[in-house]
Image (cartoon, helix red, strand yellow):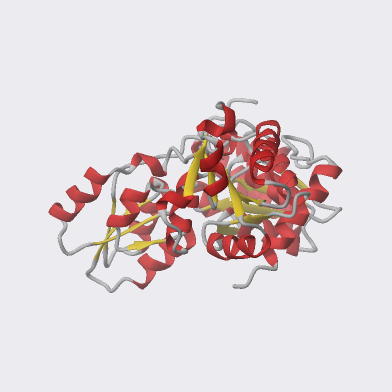
Amino acid sequence: MEALPDSREVLERIRARKKELGRELLILTHHYQRKDIVALGDFLGDSFELSRKGAADRDCRYIVFCGVHFMAESSAILARSHQTVQIPCLEAGCWMAGMADAFSLERAFEEIISVAGDGSTVPIVYMNSDASIKAFCGCRGGTVCTSSNAPAAMRRGFETASKILFVPDRHLGQNTGLRLGLRPEEMIVWDPAQPLGGNDAESVRKARLILWNGYCLVHTRFEVEHMREARVRFPEARIVVHPECTREVVALADAVGSTGFIVNYVKKAPPGSTVVVGTEINLVHRLALEYPDRKVLDLRSSLCPNMFRINPGNLLHTMEHIGEYNVVTVPEATRADARLALDRMLALPS
C-alpha cells in the first residue's frame, strides 16, 4: 500500500471517492471504531444491525465494513447477490471469535451427546464467531444470538433441548443463564483442550448450560477493584457495563446491556449526572464528546487493538480498489447453513 502524505489529504480523497461512488457504496462503522472512521461512515451500530443495513440497501453494490472480520463475514452471509463486501484490514480479527473453531466445536458436541444422548443438546452461537461456527450451529438446529437477544435465544433453546452448548463467550453465557434463573451448579465451563471439556461425565449429564471457554479481552479487563474504586471516587455515579464482563463485575453494576443499550443509557442519563462505562474506550470517549452536559467516564481504559487496525489509510486504499481489495467471501455451503442460524435468530420474539 502506498504511503500517504498526511491525514488531511487522506480524508479529502476518501470524501471525493465516496462522492464519486454515490449510492453504490455503503460504509458501515462499528461503535468501537475511532471517531475519524465513524465520521466517514453511512451507518453506525453493532455488528448484526450493520449487516442488516447493508443487505437492506438495494442500490448498494459495495459494502465496506469498518469492524472486525467476523462482522464483515456476517455481512457477506446476509448480502444480496449483487453486493461485494470488503474490509479495510484483513488482520482485524477478533480474539474471542478465534477461541472457537468448527473442528473443536464438532468434537465437543459429539462428546456431549455421547454422554447426554442424541437430542439432548442444542448449540447457541454468539454473533462474535466465524462463519463456519455459525454454519455448524445452523445445521444442528441452533441459533445465533447477540448480547441483547441472548435471553430469548436461550429460552427458545430450552424449548427444544434439555441442554445448551453456548459458544464462544462463557461470560455472556453465564450472565444470561443467571438472568434466566439458572443456578451456578447447572452451568459448567467447557475447555476444548481437555477430554469432556475438563469435566466428568456426571457433571455433563447434570449441566443445563455448557459454556465454551472463550472471552473478550476488552471486557474481561474490567475487574472488581475497578468497580470499587469507581464507587469511592464517584459515589453519585451510575455504572453501566457490557454482559461480556465477568459475573462478579456485572453483579456490582447498576445496569448491564449490549453496546446499543449502553449508548441509549448514556443518552437517557439526565444532564449533570455521572455515568461510568465499562466497555471499549473509543465508544466511551465518543459518548463523552457527544454528551458534554453530563460526565461520561471510563471504568478503565480498554482498547480493542483489532478494531483500531481500521484507519483512514487502509479505508482509502479499499475505496480506491473498490470490489477488488480485501473482499470477504463465504463458501456457499457454509453461507447457507450460517444463514439458517441467523434466520432463526430473526424469528426470536423481541
Q: Which of 206 and 71 is in front in this view?
A: 206
Identify the residue at image location x=38%, y=58%: 287
x%, y% of residue 18?
67, 51
Q: Where is residue 13 in the image (x, y as percent from the top left)?
A: 62, 43
Would you say residue 330 is visible in this rendering?
A: yes
In the image: residue 328, left or right of residue 36: right
Rendered image quadrant of residue 349: bottom right
Residue 215 or residue 121, whichever sits in front: 121
Q: In this view, does 14 lie above or below 192?
A: below
Relative to 86, 192 lies left or right: left
* Number of marks in picture: 0
Q: Which of 80 and 125 is in front in this view?
A: 125
> In the image as oriented, which residue stretches furthest toward the front?
202
In the rendered image, is residue 92 in sight? no
Position of 57 with respect to 222 (left or right) is right
Which quarter of the rendering shows the C terminus?
Answer: bottom right
Residue 308 location (% of width, % of height): 49, 38
- Taking the image as shown, residue 164 lies to the left or right of residue 223, namely right
Task: Give me the residue at 64% from left, 65% from top.
Answer: 159
Quarter of the image with the N terminus in it: top right
Q: Position of residue 104 (x, y in %)?
A: 66, 32
Q: Residue at x 59, y 59 (%)?
A: 43
